[in-house]
Amino acid sequence: MAWLEYLLPLIFLFPLAATAVIVLALRNLHDARVHSPFDAHPLREPGQGLRDRLDRAFAGLFLDGALGPIVTLAPLVYGMGRMLFASEQDWIEWALYGALCTLLALVFCFLLIRDFQRIRRLKLGLACELAVGQELERLIRPEEHPYYVFHDVPAEGYTIDHVAVTPHGVFVIETRARTPAITPGGQEDNLVAVEAERLRFPGWSERAPLFKTRQATHWLATWLEGRVGTAVPVKGVLALPGWRIDAGQAPDDLLVVGGGDLASRLTGTSLGEIDTATHDAVIVALRHRASRQDLPAPLAPAT
Protein backbone atom coordinates (compact mmCIF):
# COMPACT_ATOMS: atom_id res chain seq x y z
CA MET A 1 0.00 0.00 0.00
CA ALA A 2 1.49 3.29 -1.13
CA TRP A 3 0.16 5.29 1.81
CA LEU A 4 2.28 3.20 4.19
CA GLU A 5 5.37 4.73 2.62
CA TYR A 6 4.25 8.09 4.04
CA LEU A 7 2.86 6.77 7.33
CA LEU A 8 5.68 4.51 8.53
CA PRO A 9 8.38 7.25 8.51
CA LEU A 10 6.39 9.03 11.23
CA ILE A 11 7.84 6.46 13.64
CA PHE A 12 11.19 8.25 13.40
CA LEU A 13 9.55 11.49 14.59
CA PHE A 14 8.41 10.03 17.93
CA PRO A 15 11.71 10.76 19.77
CA LEU A 16 11.65 14.35 18.52
CA ALA A 17 8.01 14.70 19.58
CA ALA A 18 8.79 13.33 23.05
CA THR A 19 11.66 15.82 23.42
CA ALA A 20 9.36 18.67 22.33
CA VAL A 21 6.79 17.65 24.96
CA ILE A 22 9.49 17.73 27.66
CA VAL A 23 10.61 21.19 26.50
CA LEU A 24 7.04 22.51 26.66
CA ALA A 25 6.57 21.02 30.12
CA LEU A 26 9.72 22.75 31.38
CA ARG A 27 9.05 26.19 29.86
CA ASN A 28 7.62 27.57 33.12
CA LEU A 29 10.15 25.85 35.38
CA HIS A 30 11.66 29.21 36.32
CA ASP A 31 9.01 31.47 37.84
CA ALA A 32 10.46 34.32 39.89
CA ARG A 33 7.11 35.50 41.26
CA VAL A 34 6.80 35.08 45.03
CA HIS A 35 3.87 35.47 47.42
CA SER A 36 3.72 36.76 50.96
CA PRO A 37 3.75 34.01 53.63
CA PHE A 38 1.34 36.10 55.70
CA ASP A 39 -1.59 36.82 53.37
CA ALA A 40 -0.59 34.99 50.13
CA HIS A 41 -0.66 38.26 48.17
CA PRO A 42 1.98 38.62 45.46
CA LEU A 43 5.01 40.61 46.61
CA ARG A 44 5.73 43.50 44.28
CA GLU A 45 9.09 45.20 43.93
CA PRO A 46 10.07 48.21 41.81
CA GLY A 47 9.70 47.24 38.17
CA GLN A 48 7.72 44.09 39.00
CA GLY A 49 5.75 44.38 35.75
CA LEU A 50 9.00 44.47 33.77
CA ARG A 51 10.40 41.59 35.85
CA ASP A 52 7.39 39.48 34.87
CA ARG A 53 7.76 40.46 31.22
CA LEU A 54 11.47 39.63 31.40
CA ASP A 55 10.66 36.18 32.81
CA ARG A 56 8.25 35.60 29.92
CA ALA A 57 10.86 36.83 27.46
CA PHE A 58 13.42 34.35 28.81
CA ALA A 59 10.79 31.60 28.62
CA GLY A 60 10.23 32.54 24.97
CA LEU A 61 13.98 32.46 24.34
CA PHE A 62 14.16 29.02 25.95
CA LEU A 63 11.32 27.73 23.76
CA ASP A 64 12.74 29.13 20.53
CA GLY A 65 16.24 27.90 21.35
CA ALA A 66 15.13 24.40 22.39
CA LEU A 67 12.29 23.80 19.93
CA GLY A 68 14.17 25.33 16.99
CA PRO A 69 16.55 22.40 16.39
CA ILE A 70 13.75 19.88 17.01
CA VAL A 71 11.35 21.45 14.52
CA THR A 72 14.14 22.10 12.00
CA LEU A 73 15.29 18.47 12.06
CA ALA A 74 11.77 17.04 11.76
CA PRO A 75 11.55 17.27 7.90
CA LEU A 76 15.08 15.85 7.56
CA VAL A 77 14.33 12.90 9.87
CA TYR A 78 11.05 12.25 8.11
CA GLY A 79 12.80 12.39 4.71
CA MET A 80 15.38 9.84 5.87
CA GLY A 81 12.55 7.55 6.88
CA ARG A 82 10.94 8.03 3.48
CA MET A 83 14.19 6.98 1.83
CA LEU A 84 14.07 3.68 3.75
CA PHE A 85 10.47 2.84 2.91
CA ALA A 86 10.04 4.42 -0.54
CA SER A 87 10.08 2.05 -3.49
CA GLU A 88 11.45 4.79 -5.77
CA GLN A 89 13.81 7.64 -5.00
CA ASP A 90 12.29 11.04 -5.85
CA TRP A 91 15.05 13.64 -5.68
CA ILE A 92 12.59 16.52 -6.00
CA GLU A 93 10.91 15.33 -2.81
CA TRP A 94 14.25 15.11 -1.01
CA ALA A 95 15.11 18.62 -2.20
CA LEU A 96 11.82 19.88 -0.78
CA TYR A 97 12.68 18.37 2.62
CA GLY A 98 16.05 20.12 2.52
CA ALA A 99 14.49 23.43 1.53
CA LEU A 100 11.95 23.13 4.34
CA CYS A 101 14.74 22.51 6.87
CA THR A 102 16.57 25.59 5.63
CA LEU A 103 13.42 27.72 5.81
CA LEU A 104 12.66 26.58 9.38
CA ALA A 105 16.26 27.29 10.43
CA LEU A 106 15.97 30.86 9.10
CA VAL A 107 12.62 31.38 10.85
CA PHE A 108 14.00 30.31 14.23
CA CYS A 109 17.13 32.42 13.72
CA PHE A 110 14.90 35.47 13.27
CA LEU A 111 12.88 34.48 16.34
CA LEU A 112 16.06 34.21 18.44
CA ILE A 113 17.25 37.61 17.23
CA ARG A 114 13.85 39.06 18.17
CA ASP A 115 14.06 37.45 21.62
CA PHE A 116 17.55 38.86 22.27
CA GLN A 117 16.46 42.36 21.22
CA ARG A 118 13.35 42.15 23.39
CA ILE A 119 15.36 41.02 26.43
CA ARG A 120 17.86 43.82 25.88
CA ARG A 121 15.05 46.44 25.82
CA LEU A 122 13.40 44.97 28.90
CA LYS A 123 16.69 44.93 30.83
CA LEU A 124 17.20 48.60 30.03
CA GLY A 125 13.66 49.40 31.16
CA LEU A 126 14.11 47.39 34.36
CA ALA A 127 17.38 49.16 35.13
CA CYS A 128 15.64 52.52 34.83
CA GLU A 129 12.70 51.32 36.97
CA LEU A 130 15.09 50.15 39.69
CA ALA A 131 17.02 53.42 39.57
CA VAL A 132 13.84 55.46 40.00
CA GLY A 133 12.54 53.10 42.70
CA GLN A 134 15.81 53.41 44.59
CA GLU A 135 15.60 57.19 44.38
CA LEU A 136 12.03 57.09 45.69
CA GLU A 137 13.12 55.06 48.71
CA ARG A 138 14.79 58.22 50.01
CA LEU A 139 11.29 59.54 50.70
CA ILE A 140 10.62 56.91 53.33
CA ARG A 141 11.48 58.12 56.82
CA PRO A 142 9.19 56.46 59.43
CA GLU A 143 7.48 58.92 61.84
CA GLU A 144 9.74 61.78 60.75
CA HIS A 145 8.29 62.15 57.24
CA PRO A 146 4.95 60.48 56.50
CA TYR A 147 5.68 59.37 52.94
CA TYR A 148 4.45 56.17 51.32
CA VAL A 149 5.53 54.70 47.97
CA PHE A 150 3.68 52.08 45.90
CA HIS A 151 5.11 50.23 42.91
CA ASP A 152 3.22 48.80 39.89
CA VAL A 153 -0.26 49.96 40.85
CA PRO A 154 -2.92 48.34 38.59
CA ALA A 155 -5.06 50.84 36.69
CA GLU A 156 -7.65 50.21 33.96
CA GLY A 157 -5.80 47.99 31.50
CA TYR A 158 -2.29 49.16 32.40
CA THR A 159 -0.03 49.66 35.42
CA ILE A 160 1.25 52.84 37.02
CA ASP A 161 4.98 52.47 37.65
CA HIS A 162 5.09 54.28 41.01
CA VAL A 163 2.74 56.30 43.24
CA ALA A 164 4.20 58.47 46.02
CA VAL A 165 1.88 59.70 48.77
CA THR A 166 3.20 62.77 50.62
CA PRO A 167 1.67 65.22 53.10
CA HIS A 168 1.46 67.81 50.30
CA GLY A 169 0.09 65.73 47.41
CA VAL A 170 0.06 62.45 45.52
CA PHE A 171 2.51 61.93 42.67
CA VAL A 172 2.10 59.53 39.76
CA ILE A 173 5.58 58.58 38.52
CA GLU A 174 5.95 57.00 35.09
CA THR A 175 9.38 55.80 33.94
CA ARG A 176 10.53 55.57 30.33
CA ALA A 177 13.84 54.07 29.19
CA ARG A 178 15.46 55.53 26.09
CA THR A 179 19.00 55.01 24.82
CA PRO A 180 20.91 58.30 24.36
CA ALA A 181 22.00 59.18 20.83
CA ILE A 182 25.63 59.12 19.76
CA THR A 183 26.97 62.09 17.79
CA PRO A 184 29.23 61.61 14.73
CA GLY A 185 32.14 62.57 17.00
CA GLY A 186 31.37 59.67 19.34
CA GLN A 187 29.92 61.84 22.11
CA GLU A 188 26.74 60.93 23.96
CA ASP A 189 23.83 63.32 23.32
CA ASN A 190 21.36 62.91 26.18
CA LEU A 191 19.51 66.24 26.14
CA VAL A 192 15.73 66.06 25.72
CA ALA A 193 13.55 69.14 25.24
CA VAL A 194 10.14 69.02 26.89
CA GLU A 195 7.22 70.68 25.11
CA ALA A 196 3.55 70.82 25.98
CA GLU A 197 2.60 67.72 23.98
CA ARG A 198 5.83 65.99 23.07
CA LEU A 199 9.40 65.18 23.97
CA ARG A 200 12.12 66.14 21.51
CA PHE A 201 14.95 63.62 21.72
CA PRO A 202 18.09 63.96 19.57
CA GLY A 203 16.88 62.79 16.18
CA TRP A 204 13.28 61.92 17.06
CA SER A 205 10.26 63.04 19.07
CA GLU A 206 7.57 61.24 21.07
CA ARG A 207 4.10 62.15 22.30
CA ALA A 208 3.09 58.88 23.97
CA PRO A 209 5.07 59.25 27.26
CA LEU A 210 3.42 62.57 28.11
CA PHE A 211 0.00 61.28 27.05
CA LYS A 212 0.36 58.10 29.14
CA THR A 213 1.49 60.08 32.19
CA ARG A 214 -1.49 62.44 31.88
CA GLN A 215 -3.80 59.47 31.41
CA ALA A 216 -2.50 57.75 34.55
CA THR A 217 -2.69 61.01 36.54
CA HIS A 218 -6.29 61.67 35.52
CA TRP A 219 -7.31 58.09 36.28
CA LEU A 220 -5.72 58.09 39.74
CA ALA A 221 -7.20 61.47 40.67
CA THR A 222 -10.68 60.32 39.64
CA TRP A 223 -10.30 56.94 41.31
CA LEU A 224 -9.02 58.40 44.60
CA GLU A 225 -11.84 60.95 44.72
CA GLY A 226 -14.33 58.11 44.33
CA ARG A 227 -12.68 56.03 47.07
CA VAL A 228 -11.80 58.75 49.55
CA GLY A 229 -14.84 60.95 49.01
CA THR A 230 -12.93 64.17 48.44
CA ALA A 231 -10.65 65.61 45.79
CA VAL A 232 -6.98 64.75 46.32
CA PRO A 233 -4.22 66.81 44.64
CA VAL A 234 -2.45 64.53 42.14
CA LYS A 235 0.42 65.46 39.82
CA GLY A 236 2.06 63.42 37.10
CA VAL A 237 5.83 62.94 36.95
CA LEU A 238 7.69 61.51 33.97
CA ALA A 239 11.15 60.17 34.82
CA LEU A 240 13.75 59.72 32.08
CA PRO A 241 16.78 58.21 33.86
CA GLY A 242 20.09 59.18 32.33
CA TRP A 243 18.74 62.20 30.39
CA ARG A 244 19.30 65.92 30.86
CA ILE A 245 16.03 67.82 30.79
CA ASP A 246 15.43 71.09 28.92
CA ALA A 247 12.24 72.27 30.63
CA GLY A 248 12.07 75.71 29.02
CA GLN A 249 8.75 74.90 27.31
CA ALA A 250 7.59 72.22 29.75
CA PRO A 251 3.85 72.10 30.64
CA ASP A 252 2.67 73.10 34.09
CA ASP A 253 0.54 70.01 34.69
CA LEU A 254 3.45 67.55 34.48
CA LEU A 255 6.90 67.31 35.99
CA VAL A 256 9.62 65.82 33.77
CA VAL A 257 12.84 64.84 35.55
CA GLY A 258 16.01 62.95 34.78
CA GLY A 259 15.52 60.67 37.78
CA GLY A 260 18.62 61.46 39.83
CA ASP A 261 17.00 64.31 41.77
CA LEU A 262 13.52 62.80 41.89
CA ALA A 263 13.23 62.59 45.69
CA SER A 264 14.28 66.21 46.22
CA ARG A 265 11.94 67.41 43.45
CA LEU A 266 8.97 65.65 45.03
CA THR A 267 9.70 66.91 48.52
CA GLY A 268 10.11 70.42 47.12
CA THR A 269 6.85 70.38 45.13
CA SER A 270 3.73 71.22 47.13
CA LEU A 271 0.33 70.53 45.58
CA GLY A 272 -1.62 71.43 48.71
CA GLU A 273 -1.88 70.21 52.25
CA ILE A 274 -3.62 66.88 52.90
CA ASP A 275 -5.17 66.32 56.32
CA THR A 276 -4.20 63.22 58.27
CA ALA A 277 -7.52 61.41 57.73
CA THR A 278 -7.40 61.88 53.96
CA HIS A 279 -3.69 60.96 53.88
CA ASP A 280 -4.37 57.69 55.71
CA ALA A 281 -7.45 56.93 53.58
CA VAL A 282 -5.41 57.37 50.38
CA ILE A 283 -2.76 54.95 51.64
CA VAL A 284 -5.38 52.35 52.62
CA ALA A 285 -7.11 52.61 49.23
CA LEU A 286 -3.85 52.31 47.28
CA ARG A 287 -2.62 49.46 49.47
CA HIS A 288 -5.84 47.55 48.77
CA ARG A 289 -5.63 48.31 45.05
CA ALA A 290 -2.00 47.23 44.77
CA SER A 291 -2.66 43.90 46.53
CA ARG A 292 -5.78 42.85 44.63
CA GLN A 293 -5.47 39.66 42.61
CA ASP A 294 -8.93 39.65 41.02
CA LEU A 295 -8.16 42.55 38.65
CA PRO A 296 -7.82 41.86 34.92
CA ALA A 297 -4.25 41.30 33.83
CA PRO A 298 -2.85 44.71 32.80
CA LEU A 299 -1.43 45.28 29.36
CA ALA A 300 2.32 45.51 29.05
CA PRO A 301 3.30 49.15 29.57
CA ALA A 302 5.38 50.82 26.94
CA THR A 303 9.00 51.25 27.94
Image (cartoon, rainbow, N blue to C red):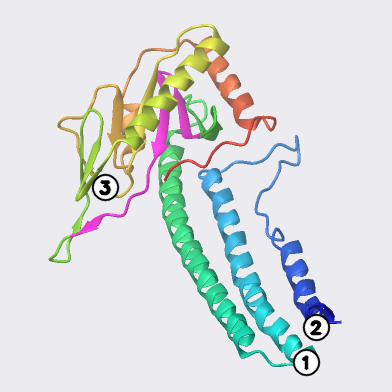
Q: Residue 243 shows which numbered tag?
A: 3
Q: Which residues are magenta?
A: 159-182
Look at label 1 and name its amino acid: Ser
Inter-mark Cα distance, 1 to 2: 8 Å
Q: Is residue 194 visible?
A: yes
The CA span between labels 2 and 3 is: 65 Å
Secondary element type, mark 2:
helix
Packing grade of label 1 (10 A; few <14, some 14-19, many >=20) is: few
Counting labels gives: 3
Callout 1: helix, strand or loop? Answer: loop
Q: Residues within 10 Å of mark 2 (few under 14, many from 20)?
A: some
Kindly identify which numbered label has been placed on residue 87. Answer: 1
User: Quadrant of residue 184 in the image?
Assistant: bottom left
Near-viewer residue (150 or 59): 59
Residue 171 visible: no
The foreground one among 155 and 43 is 155
In 3D space, how far apart are the residues under numbered discs 1 and 3 (Cα atoms)? 70 Å
Locate residue 69, reporting x and y percent.
Answer: 63, 77
Residue drawn at (54%, 18%), measured in percent from left and top?
Answer: 282
Residue 160, position in %: x, y? 48, 33
> Which badge, 2 or 3, is on the more N-terminal residue?
2
Q: Residue at x 68, y 47 (%)?
A: 34
Q: Which residue is mark 2?
A: 5
Whether label 2 touches label 3, CB < 8 Å: no
Is there a contact, CB below 8 Å, between mark 1 and mark 2?
Answer: yes
Q: Residue at x 63, y 25 (%)?
A: 288
Q: Residues within 10 Å of mark 3 (few under 14, many from 20)?
A: many
Q: The N terminus appears in which quarter of the rendering? A: bottom right
